[in-house]
Structures are given as structure tokens and as C-alpha cells.
Amino acid sequence: MSKKAVDSTSRLRPVALETWLESTRRLLSLEQKEEVETMRDEVATLDDRDNPNVLLHLSLSRSYTGLFGRPVFQFTFPSLFLHKPKPHHFTVGDVVQVRSLKPKSSQKE
């Protein structure tokens, strides 16, 4: 190991737990805000069929309160023919927007 590498590791100092937690929460909050902003931009500019942040034809099948009072929603496909969603990047814990589609008769042209 080079002397430079040893010198840089020997300068590390312990960090108080509260300081680390505060820093981590701040960074996670910044990351979440950035993800939400990116998603909003994509929802505003892309057609729902082309947007990887939009899954169509889902029905709410169950809702309940999870850990720490967080709402949990379970969605299903309403038809046997729609069992495979389009490719997407949703994972557990992602912030999502849930909205219903207006019937075609009530949409303005």
C-alpha cells in the first residue's frame, strides 16, 4: 500500500451517530426531491403509453396501514389478458403518483 493511501485513511475520524443520521436524512431528502422532480417532468412531457413511470390498467385491490403508519396499496390487473406490465423501473419504496383516467366522453378535445 502506498504511503499516500495510508495517510488518507489515518485521517478518518469517528462521527457521532446523530451527526451521521442528520447528514444521511438530508441526503435522502435531496435524492427524493430530485426523483420526484424528474418523474413530474416525464409525466408532463411524455405520453402515458411511452412513459416508463406510468403503468396503465391497474386496479386498487387492497389498501392498509403499514409500518410507522405508512399507507400501503396493492394493485392488480383488471383482466386476465393484462397480466404482464410494460417494462418499468418501479421498486419497493419508490415514490409514485396514483391517478385515475378520465373516461373518453368527459375528456376535452
Image (cartoon, rainbow, N blue to C red):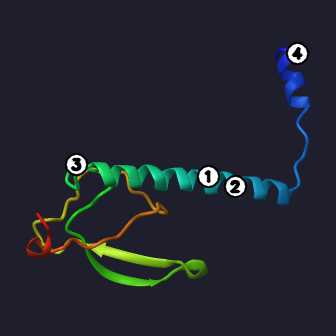
Residue on which disc 2 sits:
26
Q: Earlier in the sequence, mark 2 or mark 4?
A: 4
Mark 3 → mark 4, Cα distance in angstroms: 53 Å
The residue under label 3 is which amino acid type? Asp
Q: Earlier in the sequence, mark 3 or mark 4?
A: 4
Foreground of the two, 40 or 19? 40
User: Which of the two discs, 2 and 4, sits closer to the camera?
Assistant: 2
Residue on which disc 1 sits:
30
Residue 50's disc is 3
Foreground of the two, 78 or 49? 49
Q: Earlier in the sequence, mark 2 or mark 3?
A: 2
Apparent side of residue 24 relative to residue 41 in the rendered image (left or right)? right
- Badge 4 marks a residue whose secondary structure is helix
Q: Residue at x 22, y 48 (%)?
A: 50
The residue under label 1 is which amino acid type? Leu
Q: Residue at x 52, y 80 (%)?
A: 66
Q: Earlier in the sequence, mark 1 or mark 3?
A: 1
Mark 1 → mark 3, Cα distance in angstroms: 27 Å
User: Which of the two discs, 1 and 4, sits closer to the camera?
Assistant: 1
Other residues around mark 3 within 10 Å, as few (<14) / some (14–19) / many (≥20): few
> In the rendered image, which quarter contains the C terminus?
bottom left
The residue under label 2 is which amino acid type? Arg
Q: How many marks?
A: 4
Residue 3's disc is 4
Mark 2 → mark 1, Cα distance in angstroms: 6 Å
Other residues around mark 2 within 10 Å, as few (<14) / some (14–19) / many (≥20): few
Are dots 1 and 3 in contact, CB under 8 Å?
A: no
